[in-house]
Amino acid sequence: MYESRGGYRAVRKALKMTPDEVVAEVKKANLRGRGGAGFPAGVKWGFLPKDRTTTLLCVNADESEPPTFSNRVLMEDDPHQLLEGTIITGYATQAQVAYIYMRVEFHEQFHILQKAIDEAYAAGYLGKKIFGSDYSLECYLHRGAGAYVCGEETGLIESLEGRRGWPRIKPPFPAVEGAFRRPTVVNNVETLSCVPHIIERGADWFAGIGPPHSTGPKLFCISGPVSKPGCYEAAMEITVGELIERDDMGGGMLPGRKVKAVFPGGVSMGALTADELDMKMDFVDPGNYGLLGLGTAAAMVVDQDTDMRMVLRNVARFFGTESCGQCTHCREGTAWMYRIATRMEEGAGRIEDLDILLETARNMGMMPGLSICGLPDGATFPIETIVKKFRSELEEAIRAQAPGRVEAVLSAVN
Ligand SMILES: Cc1cc2nc3c(=O)[nH]c(=O)nc-3n(C[C@H](O)[C@H](O)[C@H](O)COP(=O)(O)O)c2cc1C
Ligand code: SF4
C-alpha cells in the first residue's frame, strides 16, 4: 500500500545522491526536531566526527510527554514512512545500525512496526546492499520499560545498552560518543517521517510551508473537553485557539464547557490562560507567553470547572515520580513541589507556599546549570506558569480553607 502511493521513491532518489547532498537538502529545508527541543536535524547530523568508522542511529519512539500521541499515530498508520525516513537518515549519516527505541506500553504499535521491518527486510530495503546499492543498514526494534526519562536521548542510550535509564553528563554529546560509545544520532519519529518528503519534493517545498523559523507540516494533538480530540496536521501557523475551535480540528469545546487553561506543548512546556489562545503553535511564539517552547505540540485543554490545585498536584506528581534521582535539586525539588501541591489540594495550603513553589522552581534544571538533563526544566515550567497565571484562584482557594486545617496537617507531618 505505502509503495503503491509513492512510498520508497525518496530513498531510491537519496541513494543516487551523496550523503552530504542529502544532509545539505535537509539543512536547507530547515527541518527542526519534532521531539521537543526543535534542534535543526541536518545541523545535528553535521556534528558527527569526520573520521568516524562506526555510526549508529537511534529513533526516539519513547513518546513519554503527557498528553502526546502523534508518534503513536505515525507508527500505527504509516510505519513504512518512518522506515523510509530512517533509511535515508541512516544513509545521510552513514549509519550501519538503526535502533528504534519504543516504550513498552506501545503493544500494538510494536507489532505493527516489527511487521513493517520484516517486510522491508524481505523486500531488500533493509539489510545488505539495500535497493541494490553499496549501502547496508540493519534495523532493530528495541522496547524500553516505559520511563519518562528514557525519552531523554542519553537516558534512552543507557537503557538501550541494558542499563538503568539514567541520563549521562554532557559533553560528550551522542554525536561524538553515544550508544556503545560510538558516534550516534538520535532523532524523533516525526522528525524522521518528514525526511522522505524533503528528498522527494525538495527542500524548497518543505521550507515553503509555515514561517521560516518553523518549516514543514506538523502534527498537533489535542485532548481534553473538546468535541474532536485527536491528532491533526497543519502548518506551524495555526494558533492554539484555532486548534481548539476549527471544525477540521478540535471542533470547539463540548457543550457547556469553557477553556480555563491550555498546556499547548505537552505538560512540561507550561500553561496558557483563556486570554492567551492567540499564541502561534510554532517554535518561537511560545516564548512570548512565558512557556518553555513548542515541545511536542500536544495541547491539553482544562475547563472552567477544574480546580487548578488539582492540576498543580497532578503535574507535580508526574515529575516527582519520573525524576531518576541522580541530581539532588531535581530529586528533592520535584518531591517538595509534589508534597506542597498535595497539601494545597487537601485544603491545607499557605499563601507563602506559592512563593516557595516559585523559588524551588527557579533553583532547578539545566537552565540554571543544576542538573544532568532537562527533566526539571520541564517540571518547573508548568508549576511556575500555573502559580503565576492562576495565582488569584489559588489564593482564593487557600483563603477559603477550613480554619485550623493547615496547623492540623503540618503538625501531623512533623
Ligand atoms: C526528560 C526528557 C524526556 C524526553 N522525552 C522525549 C521523547 O519521549 N521523545 C523524543 O523524541 N524526545 C524526547 N526528549 C528529547 C530528546 O532528548 C531529544 O532531544 C530528541 O529525541 C531529539 O530528536 P529530534 O531532534 O528529532 O527532536 C526528551 C527530553 C527530556 C529532557
Ligand atoms: S535532572 Fe532529574 S531526571 Fe535528569 S538526570 Fe538529574 S535527577 Fe535524573
Image (cartoon, helix red, strand yellow):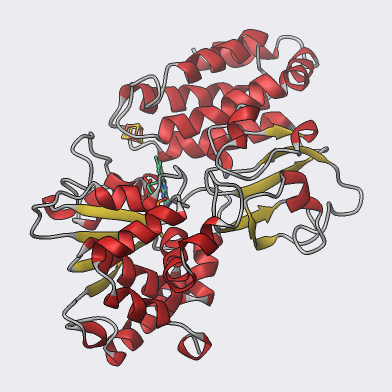
Label count reads 0
Which quadrant holds residue 372? top left
Which quadrant holds residue 22? bottom left
> Looking at this view, is 244 or 223 the one in front?
244
Residue 37, compared with residue 139, is above or below; it is: above
Question: Residue 209 location in percent, x, y?
Answer: 60, 57
Q: Is residue 305 left or right of residue 315?
A: right
User: Could one spot residue 63 in this view of the protein?
Assistant: no
Residue 330, compared with residue 244, is above or below; it is: above
Question: Residue 328 location in percent, x, y?
Answer: 32, 23
Question: Residue 339 location in percent, x, y?
Answer: 52, 24
* Residue at x 45% of width, y 50% of height: 32
Which quadrant holds residue 381? top right
User: Could one spot residue 203 in this view of the protein?
Assistant: yes
Q: Residue furthest right?
A: 256
* Residue at x 31% of width, y 72% of height: 87
Q: Is residue 331 left or right of residue 389?
A: left
* Residue at x 8% of width, y 52% of height: 51
Residue 362, compared with residue 78, is above or below; it is: above
> Looking at this view, is 67 or 314 the one in front?
67
Q: Is residue 41 left or right of residue 205?
A: left
Question: Residue 396 location in percent, x, y?
Answer: 79, 17
* Residue at x 82% of width, y 37% of height: 304
